[in-house]
Structure formats: structure tokens, C-alpha cells
């Protein structure tokens, strides 16, 4: 039983880290209406930007800001140049182009940093035990940062002008345009903020393990599965999906064995698309 | 403007020169114009094995350069094509297809990850292209390769069996294997299980997905077994995460792993010496001090070349000598002659340049190279190999023993 409880706690930690890029992914889908798979490359880029900032002496918050800014700017550039011109042809060409941009970004990082893995210069602490259950103080800290980012995003969506404009555009773009909300501007903000969140997610995952050019590719399926499970386009859905995928992946180790852990994401997508294509919370942006 | 007028005589002379030029050039260097012999390296320039592939490709290129400088093979120049398998079976198959269909190479050398070798091997034997590998999974030489495959890396049986004996010798009797999903996963667990049971110990094992960023739950399962030693049988990226998670979990027993995974890069990447302090590593021991090993040092520019660069150096030498022995450059010719140049007695040689001269003089050669004796059984496995055991102390690997 304690193994199950421990697995659930481990799942909560990985779910919290997964939730940040999943919100970014789903927010971009809500406004831009195509699944932007370049999040794999952007997460890697964010992880490396954060790594450089951390190495330069910025603390965690400063490094997260750097990861957000670099990933946001590059993500916005890619959307403007490579993805948005194709959206008019439909979501599929844009999605395929985004896979290509993800690969380009991954290889740009490879060109600059090589294939070697790198770790943030952050001493690793031993776990704290509470009976048979163990917690890692650093992982709890990273999780707390992830939760704080999520709360900030929800607050921005609920209370700021741009947040309200994004939600309005996601719900009904034509009506939003009639109300004077400029769709171009909202789309650009969605790209910038969404990709910035993905970049921060890459850094948070890197803080917990290590980074290399494949960092983002490793988590792409889990991000996509979390967003689909919660309902593509729904930010709370992405959070719920991320926690469920995180816990399901950890529990799967005990039930079907560790090699099948990656199958959890595919399985979740399959079940959702078959039984409830809207996802758990539907498509509402908030 | 100046008009250039060519006289009749000049024009005739120029024409004759133009017609004769190819023959003159051909006479100048037969190596440049004869159809070159094409061979290839398919090594991991990126991915988990990315820290080994470049030096491996360089080692083969060094051999080709030496052989071309000495006149080539059968009077023909050797061209080496180098491709990246990305430590990934899909990419490996795409690269092998290109090497076989477009470059038309007669040998592919150096596949490193067992999953890549397993995927590439059928393409090779179906197209009668010879494959030399540095992968260790038992299953590889059990494939129906019809003789088109040899490997210089000891198989899992030999490697893990040896590591098991070592663990028993340092008094570890309750061991646990953590191994990623690879062709050598189950056999690693089975072999260590057998050795431990025979030595009066117990053993447990778990196969994991190597693409994850955390292994906390896997570590929990391993620690419930209460092991006094854990065999981390993964590659570098997953082993970094595993070692960190073992440390976080407070594990204080012994750890052993393959030296190809637990290497200087891993130590730097973990970045905290106490996490890797006392960890044992093992690897097939190259023939240190020999002439071939010294040449690998020179070619790769490394003070301590890894076993894989040494092995690929040997692959290139053996493949080229087998062609000379066969007086033919096809994959089938290599298959039928490779054992004739590296085992069964004859003039001992440790490089292809000397070997090619001896073969041209009608002598039988027996190649022993940078990785060891290079004697193969009927399946393509090497017959014997020594292992080097090291222990990490204060962030540096320290030799424990070679046996």
C-alpha cells in the first residue's frame, strides 16, 4: 500500500511539472486552433536558456524568466513565420510544419551545445522521510514554483485585459473581433505566453533531472496526452490532465511494469478520443 | 579587344592533348581513377552513444587513410562513408538503407547500440553487405545472419557473467538489476540471476523505459528488495537520472554499471561527487600497450581511447585485409575470408598496411588489434576478452583490477 501512496506522490510531483507546458500547449490551441508540436523544441530551448541564466548566477526565478522570454520570443517567431501562414490551409498543415520546426530547434540547440547532457549546478538533497513515505525538498520546491506559475496564469486569464481577450477569442473569434478585440494581437500574445510557459516547463523538468537536445521530445507525448485528456483548449483541463497522466504513469510502473509507462499517454489519448473527444473538462478556455 | 587566333598546328596539338589527358592522368595515379572500394561506418554521432561515435568513425578513417597512403587495397583506393545512427533503430535503418542502396558499400562497421544493430542486421544480410558491430546483446549473433556479421564486443553472457563474478568477489550476495528496455534487458537479468544463485546469493530485476525524466517509483521497487549492490545497466542519460534518484532515496549500498554509461561525461553531468563516489564500472579491456592501441591513440587524439574506437579500428583493418585475402571486395568475400586473416595462426600483424603487404606476398596473417585477439566463433562472437574494473573515487575512475 505504501508503494501505491508513494507512487501517487511521485505522480503529483511529475504532474505539476508537466502541467506548466501543458497549459501553454492548450492555450495556444484554444486561440490558434492547431496543435503546435514545436513545443518539443521550444521546451528544450527554454531548458537551455534557463541553464545559461542559472549558470550566469541568476537564481531560479530569474532563470525561469529568461527561459520564458527566450522560448516566448522564438515560439512567436516560429508561429509568425512557419505555422500561421499555413493555418488557413487547415490545422493539419500547420501541425506538420510545427513538427518540422520542433526538429529544427532541437538541432539548433544540438549545434550550439552538442549532445552532452548537462545538469543545473544545484546540489541534490537527500529525501526527507515521513514513515515509509519520502519527499524530496527540492522537488517540493520545484512543484511549488510550478503551482505558483499555474496560479499566476489563471489569475492573468481571469483578471487582466489580455487574459479576457484571449478567452473571448478562444470562445468565439468572430464575436470577439466584433467587440474590437484584434485577433492578430491576441494570437501573438497566445503564442508568446504559451511558448513561454512551455520554455519554463522545460527548465523545471531540467532542474529535476538533466537536459540535452532531446529533453523536449521526451515529454512531448505526455504534454499532448495531458492536454487531450483535460480537453484541448481548456487550461484547467490541462492541469487536471497533467496530474492524471503523471499519477497514471507512476502507477503503471507498479501495475504493468516500467517499460509500458510511455504507453499510458497513448492509451489516454485513445480512450479520450473514443469515449469523450471533448476531453474531461470540454473545450472551454477557462 | 585582343583576338586570339589558334593556328592549325596548335589546334591539333591541343586536341591531341585533350584526348590523351585522361590516359596520362590514369597513368599518374591508378588510385584516383579506378573504381574505389566503398566501406562505411554507422556509429552514434548523436543520442545516448553520441560521446563515442565520433571517435569511432575517426578510428576507421585513420585506418583508411593509412591504407590509401600505402597504395590502397588490390590497387584500388578505399573510400569511407560515415553515417550517424543517432543511437536510434529507425535512424539506423534509414542510414543503412542509404549506405547500401546509394553508396553501395560492401561493409558497414561500428553499430553501437544493440537495438540499432538488431534493426540494421537484416538489411545487411539480405543485401550481402558485411556488418561489424560493437553491440553486446546475446540475441544479435543468434539472428539468422548467414555469417554476414561479427562483433568485437563480448556478448551479455560474457559481460554480465563476469560482472556477477566480480560482485561475488567483493561480497555482494543480494543484488538487483535496473536495466532499460533493450535487446539485452532480459538476458542481463537472467545471467546475473544465474551467477548469483550459483554463488549462494539472490537477485531481483526490473526493466524500465529509458525515456523518462524520473525513476522514483522504479527506485522504490528496487530498494524494497533490500539489495547490497545494484547493477545499473542503462546508457548514460538514463543512468544519470537513476543515480540521482538512488542518491535522493538514501541508498547506501554498492552500485556497478557499464563503463560506457558511467564515464567521465556522466560524472561531470551529475556534478556532485558524492552521488557517484564508490560506483564500480566495468568494460572489455583494450589491448593497452600494443602497437594497434598506440595507433588508435594517435588517430583519435585521445590519451585513453574507449573500447569502441579500438574495436572499430580493428573492424576496418580486418575488413580491408579480408578483401585482399579474397582478391574481391564484396560483402560475401569479406564474410568468407575475415576469419582467415584474424585467427588460425600465421604472421602476427596489428595493422592492415603490414597485413596487406604480407597477404600480397602470399603469407597467412593472424590479426590481433587494439581491442584484443579478434578471434570469432561460428556465430560471430569473440571467443575471449579481459575486463577492466574501475571504481570512482573523488570524481575520478581508479583501476581496481583487470581479469
Image (cartoon, helix red, strand yellow):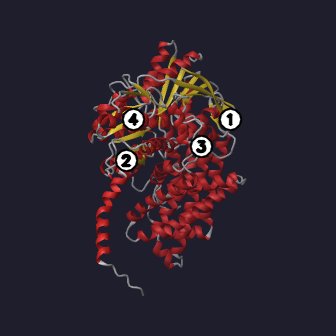
Q: Disc 1 on helix, strand or loop?
A: helix
Q: Residues within 10 Å of mark 4 (few under 14, many from 20)?
A: some
User: Quick check: marks 3 and 1 in contact, CB under 8 Å?
Assistant: no
Chain ID, mark 3: A
Tell whether label 2 touches label 1 (CB within 8 Å): no
- The span from disc 3 to disc 4 (Cα, nearest Å) is 53 Å
Are the residues under badges 3 and 4 in a single subunit? Answer: no
> Would you call the spot at circle 1 few (<14 residues within 10 Å), some (14-19), or many (20 or more)?
some
Disc 3 + disc 2, Cβ < 8 Å: no
Tag 2, which secondary structure? loop
| Residue labelled with disc 2 | B77
Quadrant of residue B368 within the rendered picture: top left
Q: Residue A236: tell me if it is visible.
A: no
Dot 3: what SS?
loop
| Image x and y of residue A213, in percent | 53, 51
Same chain, marks 3 and 1? no
Chain to which the residue tagged by mark 4 belongs: B
**Label 4 secondary element:** helix
Q: Are marks 2 and 4 in contact (CB under 8 Å)?
A: no
Q: Nearer the viewer, mark 3 or mark 4?
A: 4
User: Residue A104 location in percent, x, y?
Assistant: 48, 59
Q: Is residue B106 left or right of residue A144?
A: left
Q: Which residue is mark 4?
A: B357
The residue where tag 1 is placed is: B273
**What's the distance in space between the residues labelled 3 and 1, CA to CA?**
16 Å
Q: CA distance from mark 3 to mark 2?
A: 48 Å
Amino acid at each position: 500500500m505504501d508503494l501505491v501512496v508513494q507512487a501517487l506522490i511521485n505522480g503529483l510531483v511529475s504532474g505539476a511539472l508537466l502541467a506548466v507546458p501543458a497549459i501553454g500547449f492548450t492555450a495556444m490551441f484554444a486561440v490558434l486552433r492547431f496543435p503546435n508540436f514545436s513545443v518539443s523544441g521550444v521546451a528544450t530551448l527554454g531548458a537551455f536558456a534557463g541553464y545559461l541564466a542559472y549558470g550566469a548566477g541568476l537564481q531560479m526565478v530569474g532563470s525561469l524568466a529568461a527561459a520564458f522570454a527566450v522560448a516566448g520570443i522564438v515560439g512567436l517567431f516560429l508561429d509568425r513565420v512557419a505555422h500561421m501562414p499555413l493555418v488557413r490551409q487547415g490545422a493539419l498543415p500547420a501541425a506538420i510544419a510545427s513538427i518540422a520546426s520542433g526538429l529544427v530547434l532541437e538541432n539548433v540547440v544540438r549545434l550550439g551545445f552538442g549532445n552532452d547532457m548537462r545538469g543545473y549546478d544545484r546540489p541534490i538533497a537527500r529525501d526527507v522521510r515521513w514513515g515509509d513515505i519520502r519527499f524530496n525538498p527540492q522537488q517540493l520546491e520545484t512543484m511549488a514554483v510550478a503551482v505558483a506559475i499555474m496560479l499566476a496564469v489563471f489569475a492573468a486569464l481571469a483578471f487582466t485585459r489580455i487574459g479576457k481577450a484571449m478567452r473571448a477569442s478562444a470562445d468565439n473569434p468572430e464575436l470577439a473581433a466584433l467587440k474590437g478585440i484584434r485577433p492578430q494581437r491576441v494570437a501573438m500574445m497566445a503564442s508568446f505566453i504559451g511558448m513561454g510557459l512551455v520554455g519554463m516547463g522545460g527548465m523545471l523538468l531540467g532542474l529535476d533531472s538533466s537536459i540535452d537536445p532531446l529533453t523536449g521530445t521526451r515529454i512531448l507525448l505526455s504534454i499532448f496526452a495531458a492536454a487531450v485528456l483535460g480537453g484541448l483548449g481548456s487550461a484547467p483541463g490541462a492541469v487536471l490532465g497533467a496530474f492524471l497522466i503523471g499519477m497514471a504513469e507512476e502507477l503503471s510502473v507498479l501495475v504493468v511494469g516500467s517499460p509500458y509507462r510511455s504507453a499510458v499517454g497513448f492509451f489516454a489519448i485513445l480512450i479520450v478520443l473514443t469515449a469523450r473527444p471533448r476531453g474531461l473538462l470540454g473545450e472551454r478556455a477557462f | 579587344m585582343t583576338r586570339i587566333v589558334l593556328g592549325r598546328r596548335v589546334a591539333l596539338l591541343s586536341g591531341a592533348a585533350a584526348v590523351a589527358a585522361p590516359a596520362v592522368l590514369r597513368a599518374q595515379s591508378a588510385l584516383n581513377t579506378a573504381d574505389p572500394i566503398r566501406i562505411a561506418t554507422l556509429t552514434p554521432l548523436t543520442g545516448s552513444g553520441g560521446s563515442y561515435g565520433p571517435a569511432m568513425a575517426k578510428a576507421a578513417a585513420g585506418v583508411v587513410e593509412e591504407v590509401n597512403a600505402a597504395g590502397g587495397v588490390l590497387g584500388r583506393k578505399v573510400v569511407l562513408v560515415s553515417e550517424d545512427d543517432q543511437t536510434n533503430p529507425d535512424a539506423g535503418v534509414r542510414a543503412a538503407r542509404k549506405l547500401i542502396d546509394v553508396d553501395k558499400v560492401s561493409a558497414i562497421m561500428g553499430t553501437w547500440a544493440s537495438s540499432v544493430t538488431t534493426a540494421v542486421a537484416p538489411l545487411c544480410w539480405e543485401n550481402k553487405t558485411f556488418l561489424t558491430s560493437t553491440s553486446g546483446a546475446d540475441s544479435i549473433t543468434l539472428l539468422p545472419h548467414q555469417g554476414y556479421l561479427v562483433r568485437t564486443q563480448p556478448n551479455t553472457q560474457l559481460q554480465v557473467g563476469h560482472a556477477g563474478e566480480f560482485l561475488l568477489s567483493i561480497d555482494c550476495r543480494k543484488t538487483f538489476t535496473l536495466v532499460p528496455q533493450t535487446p539485452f534487458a532480459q538476458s542481463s537479468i537472467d545471467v546475473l540471476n544465474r551467477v548469483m544463485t550459483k554463488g549462494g546469493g539472490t537477485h531481483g530485476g526490473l526493466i524500465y523505459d529509458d525515456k523518462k525524466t524520473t525513476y522514483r517509483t522504479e527506485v522504490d521497487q528496487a530498494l524494497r528488495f533490500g539489495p547490497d549492490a545494484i547493477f545499473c545497466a542503462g546508457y548514460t542519460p538514463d543512468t544519470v537520472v537513476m543515480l540521482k534518484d538512488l542518491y535522493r532515496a538514501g541508498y547506501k549500498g554498492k552500485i556497478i554499471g557499464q563503463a560506457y554509461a558511467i564515464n567521465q561525461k556522466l560524472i561531470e553531468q551529475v556534478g556532485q561527487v558524492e552521488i557517484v563516489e564508490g560506483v564500480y564500472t566495468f568494460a572489455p579491456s583494450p589491448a593497452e600497450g600494443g602497437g594497434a592501441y598506440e595507433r588508435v591513440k594517435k588517430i583519435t587524439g585521445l590519451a585513453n581511447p574507449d573500447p569502441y574506437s579500438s574495436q572499430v579500428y580493428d573492424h576496418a583493418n580486418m575488413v580491408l585485409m579480408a578483401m585482399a585475402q579474397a582478391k574481391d571486395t564484396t560483402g560475401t568475400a569479406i564474410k568468407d575470408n575475415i576469419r582467415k586473416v584474424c585467427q588460425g595462426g600465421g604472421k602476427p600483424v596489428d595493422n592492415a598496411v603490414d597485413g596487406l603487404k604480407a597477404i600480397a606476398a602470399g603469407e597467412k596473417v593472424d590479426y590481433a588489434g587494439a581491442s584484443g585477439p579478434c578471434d570469432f566463433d561460428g556465430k560471430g562472437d569473440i571467443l575471449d576478452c579481459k575486463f577492466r574494473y574501475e571504481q570512482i573515487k573523488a570524481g575520478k575512475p581508479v583501476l581496481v583490477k583487470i581479469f
